[in-house]
Image (spheres, rainbow, N blue to C red):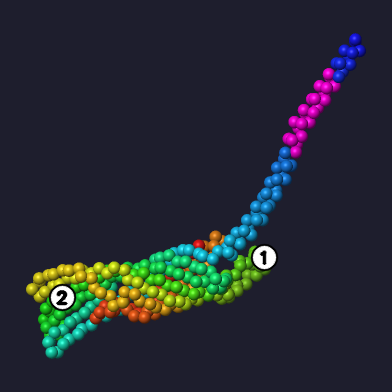
Amino acid sequence: MYRCMKSRSSATLLGFVVVSSAAALCGQAPAAQQPTQESETKAPSGTSSSSSQAPETDTKRRARRFSYGAQLRWSSAQPFDGKGIEVGDSKTDISHAYDTTSASSRWGIGPVVDMTLTSHIVIRAEALFEHLQYTKVTQVYTGTPTDGTLNVTYTEHTRTGYWDFPLLLRYQNSPPRPTTSTSSSNSGSRIHFSLNPIVSHAFVEVGGIVRQLTTIRSGNDTLDSDNSTAYNETPTKASHSTVEGAVVGLGLRFVDELNLKVIPEVRYILWSGPTFESQSTLSRTRQLEVGLSFVF
Protein backbone atom coordinates (compact mmCIF):
# COMPACT_ATOMS: atom_id res chain seq x y z
CA MET A 1 0.00 0.00 0.00
CA TYR A 2 2.87 2.35 0.77
CA ARG A 3 4.35 1.64 -2.66
CA CYS A 4 0.99 2.33 -4.32
CA MET A 5 0.67 5.67 -2.56
CA LYS A 6 4.25 6.55 -3.43
CA SER A 7 3.71 5.73 -7.08
CA ARG A 8 0.50 7.80 -7.13
CA SER A 9 2.25 10.83 -5.60
CA SER A 10 5.09 10.48 -8.08
CA ALA A 11 2.62 10.31 -10.94
CA THR A 12 0.77 13.35 -9.60
CA LEU A 13 4.01 15.33 -9.24
CA LEU A 14 5.10 14.32 -12.73
CA GLY A 15 1.77 15.36 -14.18
CA PHE A 16 1.96 18.72 -12.39
CA VAL A 17 5.45 19.32 -13.79
CA VAL A 18 4.33 18.39 -17.33
CA VAL A 19 1.25 20.63 -17.16
CA SER A 20 3.26 23.54 -15.75
CA SER A 21 5.92 23.16 -18.45
CA ALA A 22 3.30 23.00 -21.21
CA ALA A 23 1.53 26.06 -19.87
CA ALA A 24 4.82 27.96 -19.68
CA LEU A 25 5.75 26.96 -23.20
CA CYS A 26 2.30 27.86 -24.55
CA GLY A 27 2.36 31.27 -22.83
CA GLN A 28 5.89 32.27 -23.90
CA ALA A 29 5.98 31.05 -27.46
CA PRO A 30 3.60 33.61 -28.99
CA ALA A 31 5.24 36.47 -27.08
CA ALA A 32 8.64 35.52 -28.45
CA GLN A 33 7.40 35.10 -32.05
CA GLN A 34 5.01 38.06 -32.20
CA PRO A 35 7.60 40.77 -33.05
CA THR A 36 8.98 38.61 -35.82
CA GLN A 37 5.53 38.11 -37.35
CA GLU A 38 4.67 41.81 -37.09
CA SER A 39 7.95 42.82 -38.67
CA GLU A 40 7.42 40.26 -41.40
CA THR A 41 3.90 41.48 -42.11
CA LYS A 42 4.71 45.22 -41.91
CA ALA A 43 7.73 45.07 -44.17
CA PRO A 44 5.97 43.54 -47.17
CA SER A 45 2.92 45.76 -46.76
CA GLY A 46 5.03 48.93 -46.60
CA THR A 47 7.14 47.81 -49.50
CA SER A 48 4.15 46.86 -51.63
CA SER A 49 2.25 50.10 -50.89
CA SER A 50 5.20 52.34 -51.72
CA SER A 51 6.05 50.40 -54.82
CA SER A 52 2.48 50.24 -56.07
CA GLN A 53 1.41 53.84 -55.39
CA ALA A 54 4.06 55.51 -57.50
CA PRO A 55 3.32 53.60 -60.71
CA GLU A 56 -0.40 54.00 -60.09
CA THR A 57 -0.03 57.79 -59.69
CA ASP A 58 2.09 58.04 -62.83
CA THR A 59 -0.46 56.00 -64.73
CA LYS A 60 -3.27 58.31 -63.62
CA ARG A 61 -1.29 61.36 -64.71
CA ARG A 62 -0.59 59.84 -68.09
CA ALA A 63 -4.14 58.62 -68.52
CA ARG A 64 -5.82 61.94 -67.60
CA ARG A 65 -7.38 63.31 -70.76
CA PHE A 66 -9.56 66.15 -69.47
CA SER A 67 -8.29 68.99 -67.28
CA TYR A 68 -10.41 71.75 -65.78
CA GLY A 69 -9.63 75.20 -64.48
CA ALA A 70 -10.23 78.94 -64.79
CA GLN A 71 -8.72 81.80 -66.75
CA LEU A 72 -8.27 85.52 -66.08
CA ARG A 73 -8.02 87.79 -69.15
CA TRP A 74 -6.92 91.40 -69.60
CA SER A 75 -7.51 93.39 -72.79
CA SER A 76 -4.91 95.93 -73.85
CA ALA A 77 -7.50 98.55 -74.91
CA GLN A 78 -11.12 99.58 -74.46
CA PRO A 79 -13.56 97.80 -76.80
CA PHE A 80 -14.45 101.08 -78.61
CA ASP A 81 -12.27 103.34 -80.73
CA GLY A 82 -13.59 106.45 -78.95
CA LYS A 83 -13.33 108.89 -81.87
CA GLY A 84 -15.60 111.93 -82.03
CA ILE A 85 -17.03 112.90 -85.44
CA GLU A 86 -18.97 115.83 -86.87
CA VAL A 87 -21.51 115.60 -89.69
CA GLY A 88 -23.04 118.69 -91.36
CA ASP A 89 -25.78 119.24 -93.92
CA SER A 90 -25.39 122.36 -96.01
CA LYS A 91 -28.98 122.22 -97.31
CA THR A 92 -30.61 122.31 -93.87
CA ASP A 93 -27.75 124.11 -92.11
CA ILE A 94 -27.95 121.46 -89.37
CA SER A 95 -24.84 119.82 -87.92
CA HIS A 96 -24.41 116.85 -85.59
CA ALA A 97 -21.48 116.24 -83.26
CA TYR A 98 -21.06 112.66 -81.99
CA ASP A 99 -18.76 111.55 -79.21
CA THR A 100 -18.54 108.13 -77.50
CA THR A 101 -16.58 107.29 -74.37
CA SER A 102 -16.20 103.77 -73.00
CA ALA A 103 -16.06 102.76 -69.35
CA SER A 104 -16.03 99.02 -69.99
CA SER A 105 -14.17 96.55 -67.87
CA ARG A 106 -11.00 95.26 -69.47
CA TRP A 107 -10.99 92.13 -67.29
CA GLY A 108 -12.70 88.87 -68.14
CA ILE A 109 -12.96 85.58 -66.28
CA GLY A 110 -14.40 82.14 -66.97
CA PRO A 111 -13.90 78.36 -66.97
CA VAL A 112 -11.61 76.39 -69.28
CA VAL A 113 -11.44 72.74 -70.32
CA ASP A 114 -8.39 71.06 -71.87
CA MET A 115 -8.60 67.78 -73.76
CA THR A 116 -5.20 66.13 -74.26
CA LEU A 117 -4.91 64.22 -77.53
CA THR A 118 -1.17 63.53 -77.40
CA SER A 119 1.74 64.74 -75.29
CA HIS A 120 2.09 67.70 -77.70
CA ILE A 121 -1.45 68.41 -78.94
CA VAL A 122 -4.23 69.80 -76.74
CA ILE A 123 -7.70 71.10 -77.58
CA ARG A 124 -8.94 73.90 -75.33
CA ALA A 125 -12.49 75.24 -74.90
CA GLU A 126 -13.20 78.40 -72.91
CA ALA A 127 -16.12 80.61 -71.86
CA LEU A 128 -15.12 84.15 -70.80
CA PHE A 129 -17.51 86.85 -69.58
CA GLU A 130 -16.89 90.60 -69.66
CA HIS A 131 -18.94 93.76 -69.01
CA LEU A 132 -19.51 96.38 -71.71
CA GLN A 133 -20.49 100.00 -71.09
CA TYR A 134 -20.36 103.23 -73.07
CA THR A 135 -21.82 106.75 -73.16
CA LYS A 136 -22.72 108.44 -76.43
CA VAL A 137 -23.41 112.18 -76.64
CA THR A 138 -25.12 113.64 -79.70
CA GLN A 139 -25.36 117.43 -80.06
CA VAL A 140 -27.50 119.09 -82.74
CA TYR A 141 -26.49 122.58 -83.95
CA THR A 142 -27.90 125.16 -86.26
CA GLY A 143 -24.84 125.99 -88.31
CA THR A 144 -21.53 124.40 -87.41
CA PRO A 145 -20.46 123.07 -84.01
CA THR A 146 -17.79 125.76 -83.90
CA ASP A 147 -19.88 128.93 -84.41
CA GLY A 148 -23.45 127.58 -84.53
CA THR A 149 -26.28 127.41 -81.99
CA LEU A 150 -26.81 124.34 -79.85
CA ASN A 151 -30.39 123.14 -80.15
CA VAL A 152 -30.58 119.81 -78.33
CA THR A 153 -28.32 117.27 -76.62
CA TYR A 154 -28.99 113.53 -76.55
CA THR A 155 -27.09 111.38 -74.06
CA GLU A 156 -27.22 107.60 -74.32
CA HIS A 157 -25.95 105.37 -71.48
CA THR A 158 -25.74 101.73 -72.60
CA ARG A 159 -24.73 98.74 -70.54
CA THR A 160 -24.49 95.11 -71.55
CA GLY A 161 -22.14 92.15 -71.37
CA TYR A 162 -20.83 89.46 -73.65
CA TRP A 163 -19.54 85.89 -73.61
CA ASP A 164 -16.51 84.87 -75.65
CA PHE A 165 -16.27 81.20 -76.61
CA PRO A 166 -12.78 80.36 -77.96
CA LEU A 167 -12.00 76.89 -79.32
CA LEU A 168 -8.24 76.43 -79.77
CA LEU A 169 -5.78 73.84 -81.00
CA ARG A 170 -2.51 74.00 -79.09
CA TYR A 171 0.91 72.54 -79.84
CA GLN A 172 3.14 72.37 -76.77
CA ASN A 173 6.59 71.09 -75.89
CA SER A 174 7.33 68.67 -73.07
CA PRO A 175 9.03 70.36 -70.07
CA PRO A 176 12.45 68.86 -69.18
CA ARG A 177 12.86 66.74 -66.08
CA PRO A 178 14.63 68.43 -63.15
CA THR A 179 18.37 67.80 -63.04
CA THR A 180 19.90 65.78 -60.20
CA SER A 181 22.16 67.21 -57.54
CA THR A 182 25.15 65.34 -59.00
CA SER A 183 24.86 66.98 -62.37
CA SER A 184 24.40 70.41 -60.81
CA SER A 185 27.44 69.96 -58.56
CA ASN A 186 29.60 68.91 -61.50
CA SER A 187 28.83 72.15 -63.30
CA GLY A 188 31.04 74.02 -60.83
CA SER A 189 30.94 77.80 -60.75
CA ARG A 190 30.32 78.23 -64.49
CA ILE A 191 27.15 80.01 -65.57
CA HIS A 192 25.39 78.49 -68.57
CA PHE A 193 22.56 80.38 -70.26
CA SER A 194 20.32 78.49 -72.65
CA LEU A 195 16.91 79.13 -74.15
CA ASN A 196 16.08 75.44 -74.03
CA PRO A 197 14.44 75.55 -70.54
CA ILE A 198 12.17 78.38 -71.75
CA VAL A 199 11.39 76.86 -75.14
CA SER A 200 10.56 73.54 -73.51
CA HIS A 201 7.63 75.24 -71.71
CA ALA A 202 6.44 77.20 -74.75
CA PHE A 203 3.38 76.55 -76.90
CA VAL A 204 1.54 78.06 -79.86
CA GLU A 205 -2.18 77.93 -80.55
CA VAL A 206 -4.68 78.77 -83.26
CA GLY A 207 -8.45 78.58 -83.43
CA GLY A 208 -11.76 80.38 -83.68
CA ILE A 209 -13.88 82.44 -81.31
CA VAL A 210 -17.54 83.47 -81.08
CA ARG A 211 -18.80 86.53 -79.18
CA GLN A 212 -22.41 86.63 -77.98
CA LEU A 213 -23.95 89.78 -76.48
CA THR A 214 -26.27 89.55 -73.47
CA THR A 215 -29.29 91.77 -72.73
CA ILE A 216 -28.77 95.43 -73.72
CA ARG A 217 -30.00 98.16 -71.34
CA SER A 218 -30.03 101.84 -72.28
CA GLY A 219 -30.98 105.10 -70.59
CA ASN A 220 -31.57 108.05 -72.93
CA ASP A 221 -31.57 111.68 -71.71
CA THR A 222 -32.74 114.65 -73.82
CA LEU A 223 -31.81 118.25 -72.99
CA ASP A 224 -33.34 121.01 -75.13
CA SER A 225 -32.02 124.52 -75.53
CA ASP A 226 -34.73 125.82 -73.16
CA ASN A 227 -33.44 123.39 -70.45
CA SER A 228 -36.45 121.08 -70.74
CA THR A 229 -35.60 117.42 -70.31
CA ALA A 230 -36.93 114.00 -71.26
CA TYR A 231 -35.94 110.45 -70.46
CA ASN A 232 -36.64 106.95 -71.80
CA GLU A 233 -35.13 103.49 -71.55
CA THR A 234 -35.47 102.30 -75.10
CA PRO A 235 -32.53 99.89 -75.62
CA THR A 236 -30.20 100.57 -78.48
CA LYS A 237 -29.74 97.91 -81.13
CA ALA A 238 -26.42 96.23 -81.79
CA SER A 239 -25.12 95.92 -85.32
CA HIS A 240 -24.16 92.29 -84.70
CA SER A 241 -25.23 90.51 -81.52
CA THR A 242 -23.10 87.51 -82.58
CA VAL A 243 -19.64 87.95 -84.07
CA GLU A 244 -17.06 85.36 -85.14
CA GLY A 245 -13.30 85.76 -85.14
CA ALA A 246 -9.90 84.09 -85.51
CA VAL A 247 -7.32 83.65 -82.72
CA VAL A 248 -3.56 83.11 -82.67
CA GLY A 249 -1.51 82.98 -79.49
CA LEU A 250 1.62 81.85 -77.72
CA GLY A 251 2.58 81.28 -74.12
CA LEU A 252 4.30 79.19 -71.48
CA ARG A 253 3.08 76.14 -69.58
CA PHE A 254 4.39 75.18 -66.13
CA VAL A 255 3.38 71.95 -64.32
CA ASP A 256 4.11 71.16 -60.67
CA GLU A 257 4.20 67.83 -58.80
CA LEU A 258 0.44 67.94 -58.13
CA ASN A 259 -0.24 68.29 -61.88
CA LEU A 260 -1.37 71.92 -61.43
CA LYS A 261 -0.71 73.84 -64.65
CA VAL A 262 0.00 77.58 -64.62
CA ILE A 263 -0.33 79.01 -68.13
CA PRO A 264 0.44 82.66 -69.02
CA GLU A 265 -0.16 83.60 -72.65
CA VAL A 266 -0.69 86.40 -75.19
CA ARG A 267 -3.38 86.31 -77.90
CA TYR A 268 -4.31 88.34 -80.96
CA ILE A 269 -7.94 88.26 -82.13
CA LEU A 270 -9.31 89.43 -85.47
CA TRP A 271 -13.11 89.87 -85.52
CA SER A 272 -15.24 89.55 -88.63
CA GLY A 273 -17.17 92.74 -87.78
CA PRO A 274 -18.07 95.21 -85.02
CA THR A 275 -20.75 94.50 -82.42
CA PHE A 276 -21.78 98.19 -82.30
CA GLU A 277 -21.48 100.49 -85.32
CA SER A 278 -23.30 103.81 -85.07
CA GLN A 279 -21.60 107.15 -85.80
CA SER A 280 -18.91 107.48 -83.11
CA THR A 281 -19.84 104.17 -81.43
CA LEU A 282 -17.59 101.72 -83.23
CA SER A 283 -16.39 98.46 -81.69
CA ARG A 284 -12.83 97.39 -82.30
CA THR A 285 -12.29 94.54 -84.73
CA ARG A 286 -8.73 93.80 -83.57
CA GLN A 287 -7.88 92.84 -80.03
CA LEU A 288 -4.67 92.07 -78.11
CA GLU A 289 -5.08 90.36 -74.75
CA VAL A 290 -3.06 88.72 -71.99
CA GLY A 291 -4.36 85.68 -70.11
CA LEU A 292 -3.42 83.63 -67.07
CA SER A 293 -5.08 80.26 -66.48
CA PHE A 294 -4.85 77.66 -63.71
CA VAL A 295 -5.74 74.11 -64.77
CA PHE A 296 -5.75 70.90 -62.77
Residue 286 visible from this viewpoint:
no
Q: Is residue 288 magenta?
A: no
Magenta-colored span? 12-33
**With respect to residue 32, does 11 lie above or below?**
above
Query: Mark 2–mark 1 contact, CB under 8 Å?
Result: no
Disc 1 element = helix
Q: Is residue 21 magenta?
A: yes
> Is residue 12 left or right of 239 when viewed as pictured?
right
Q: Residue at x 15, y 80 (%)?
A: 140
Residue 168: where, in percent of width, then height?
Answer: 46, 74
Image quadrant where residue 141 sits:
bottom left
Which mark is in front, 2 or 1? Answer: 2
> Is residue 111 left or right of 21 when viewed as pictured?
left
Residue 187: where, in percent of width, then height?
Answer: 65, 70
Q: Earlier in the sequence, mark 2 or mark 1?
A: 2
Image quadrant where residue 255 sits:
bottom right
Disc 2 element = strand
Pointer 1 residue: 182
Q: Residue furthest right?
A: 3
Q: Residue at x 13, y 69 (%)?
A: 230
Residue 123 visible from this viewpoint:
yes
- How far is the residue under mark 2 from the one under mark 1? 77 Å
Q: Residue at x 23, y 82 (%)?
A: 85
- Residue 153 - label: 2
SS majority, magenta:
helix
Residue 21: where, in percent of width, then height?
Answer: 81, 27
Give the amino acid at mark 2.
Thr
Mark 2 surroundings: few (<14), some (14-19) or many (≥20) residues within 10 A: some
Mark 1 surroundings: few (<14), some (14-19) or many (≥20) residues within 10 A: few
Residue 228: where, in percent of width, then height?
Answer: 10, 71
- Residue 191 - label: none
Give the amino acid at mark 1.
Thr
